[in-house]
Image (tube, rainbow, N blue to C red):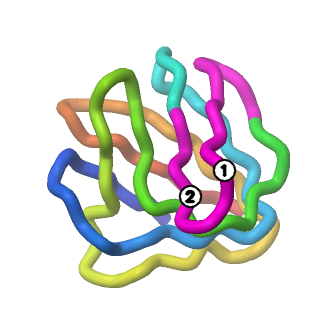
Amino acid sequence: MNICFTETPSRKTVKPSKTIFLNNTGQDVTLKFVTAPDLVLNAYTISTGISAAIDHIRLGMTDYYSCHSQNVAIPGDCTAVLTLSNSVLTMAVSG
């Protein structure tokens, strides 16, 4: 499953469930959660399992928002790889 994020603001969230994130963007990213403190994930590093709803993701000075028409839930115990291409931040989920 791919979840895409663009610069267009939205109110849709992405809800991981013990998801491990790999930041493969080449830059530090900040996961901005709905009710939890922000988490900085350095370039080419792996997070611990995350279960807090993501409001948006900051990459450099740019905020990226889910471009899906509804909130998205990630199944439990998956891995999500973050990549950036053509101004679209993609979260490729596998598990």
Verify whether residue 40 appears in magenta: yes
Residue at the spot 77% in from the left edge and 74% down from the top edge: 76
Question: What is the secondary structure assignment of the residue under circle 1?
Answer: loop
Q: Name the residue under label 2.
A: 33
Residue at the spot 25% in from the left edge and 80% down from the top edge: 69
User: Which amino acid type is marked by label 2?
Assistant: Phe
Q: Residue 20 location, x and y as percent?
A: 75, 49
Q: Is residue 23 left or right of residue 68?
A: right
Start and end of the magenta stretch?
A: 30-46
Q: Is residue 83 left or right of residue 62?
A: right
Verify whether residue 42 appears in magenta: yes
User: Which amino acid type is marked by label 1?
Assistant: Pro
Disc ID at residue 94: none
Residue at the spot 58% in from the left edge and 72% down from the top edge: 15
Q: Is residue 75 above or below residue 21?
A: below
Which image quadrant for residue 18?
Answer: bottom right
